[in-house]
């Protein structure tokens, strides 16, 4: 018999939802016709909550879940009101580390794809153009300069892969990392001006909103490429659209957008852009590890009162 009732803030990956449903009594919040009234009348009913980064968790839910836990599937926590969580003594967990390698792999796949025009070349062959036309040249990746915005766990994994291509790496962030072996660049515009490839790998949220601005894109220049596997909010999307349309940057590889799943039409059917549907962590191996970590965090809280992997 399921003894603990969890508030499910939004739909979860099917496998995770099935396994949690075998151990807990899940209540789907999004099916409630009057959300505010339901929350008002539900205090004390739930032993905790479960969500995804894309659903987040606002202050009113943390208020409802006073003294319990919210386990989040995903590494991003900008949608979780952590101040409200602290105020209401709610333990919060995310799923870091287990997705580092796959996200870094995807970042480097985008580097190679935009520079070597892999997707455009595939379309060229698929459309039967090769027998009668010559395909244009791409850009070499090996030995080039890679700037990383955010040298956290994922940023370090990207830098490691860049080393395999003999690339020169520098990074930008709020402050230098004392254990980093790569040069720190305190000014993002200077980093963009130096880099051939600028890879965005920092957290989203208000502090980084539109961090990659029109000025940064201008500094990146007509031979520079932008890669974003972090959050769409970090890049000024209107400035990026202008940079692509005006060809003031060489191209972009994007896995994230400001208003997912909606992608600006200016980016579509453009051989200088590679677009992915937010799949950087989307591998069977990573998905399984992320799901297990959600389960482990809930189990840890109910056993010891502490989660295993809080945000940060």
Image (cartoon, rainbow, N blue to C red):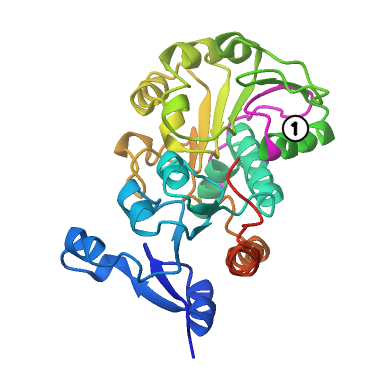
The front one of 147 and 268 is 147
Q: Position of residue 185 (x, y in %)?
A: 67, 13
Residue marked by disc 1: 159
User: In the figure, is residue 281 to the left or right of 60?
Assistant: right
User: In the figure, is residue 157 to the left or right of 271?
Assistant: right
Residue furthest out toward the bottom: 1
In the rendered image of this protein, does residue 285 appear above or below residue 221? Answer: below
Q: Position of residue 105 (x, y in %)?
A: 69, 46
Does residue 137 belong to the magenta stretch? Answer: yes
The front one of 169 and 95 is 95
In the rendered image of this protein, does residue 12 appear above or below residue 234? Answer: below
Regarding mark 1 in the picture, which secondary structure is present there? helix
In the rendered image of this protein, does residue 231 appear above or below residue 15? Answer: above
Q: How many marks?
A: 1
Q: Quadrant of the C terminus?
A: top right
User: In the figure, is residue 59 to the left or right of 301?
Assistant: left
Does residue 236 belong to the magenta stretch? Answer: no
Q: Position of residue 254 (x, y in %)?
A: 50, 39
The front one of 266 and 188 is 188
* Residue appearing at x 82%, y 32% in the figure: 163
Which of the 4 image quadrants contains residue 137?
A: top right
**Magenta highlight: main SS:** loop
Which span of residues is magenta-colored?
Answer: 129-153
Q: Residues within 10 Å of mark 1 (few under 14, many from 20)?
A: many
* Residue appearing at x 42%, y 49% in the figure: 88
Q: Position of residue 310 (x, y in %)?
A: 60, 49
In the rendered image of this protein, does residue 311 appear above or below residue 294? Answer: above
* Residue appearing at x 65%, y 60% in the figure: 286
């Amino acid at each position: 018999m399921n003894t603990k009732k969890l508030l499910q803030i939004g739909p979860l990956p099917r496998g995770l939802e099935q396994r949690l449903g075998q151990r807990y009594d899940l209540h789907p919040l999004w099916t409630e016709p009057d959300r505010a009234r339901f929350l008002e009348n539900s205090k004390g009913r739930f032993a905790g909550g479960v969500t995804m980064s894309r659903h987040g968790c606002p202050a009113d839910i943390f208020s409802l879940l006073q003294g319990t836990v919210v386990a989040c599937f995903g590494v991003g926590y900008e949608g979780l009101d952590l101040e409200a969580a602290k105020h209401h003594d709610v333990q919060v967990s995310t799923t870091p580390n287990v997705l580092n390698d796959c996200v870094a792999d995807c970042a480097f796949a985008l580097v190679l794809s935009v520079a070597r025009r892999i997707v455009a070349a595939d379309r060229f062959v698929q459309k039967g153009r090769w027998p009668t036309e010559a395909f244009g040249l791409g850009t070499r990746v090996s030995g080039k300069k890679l700037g990383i915005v955010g040298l956290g766990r994922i940023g370090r994994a990207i830098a490691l892969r860049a080393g395999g291509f003999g690339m020169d790496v520098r990074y930008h962030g709020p402050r230098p990392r004392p254990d980093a072996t790569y040069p720190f660049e305190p000014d993002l515009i200077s980093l963009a001006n130096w880099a051939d490839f600028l890879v965005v790998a920092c957290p989203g949220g208000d502090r980084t909103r539109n961090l990659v601005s029109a000025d940064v894109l201008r500094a990146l220049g007509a031979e520079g490429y932008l890669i974003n596997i972090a959050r769409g909010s970090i890049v000024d999307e209107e400035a990026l659209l202008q940079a692509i349309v005006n060809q003031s940057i060489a191209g972009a590889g994007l896995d994230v957008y400001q208003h997912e799943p909606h992608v600006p039409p200016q980016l579509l059917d453009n051989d200088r852009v590679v677009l992915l549907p937010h799949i950087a962590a989307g591998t069977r191996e990573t998905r399984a590890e992320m799901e297990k970590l959600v389960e482990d965090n809930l189990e840890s809280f109910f056993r010891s009162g502490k989660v295993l992997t809080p945000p940060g």
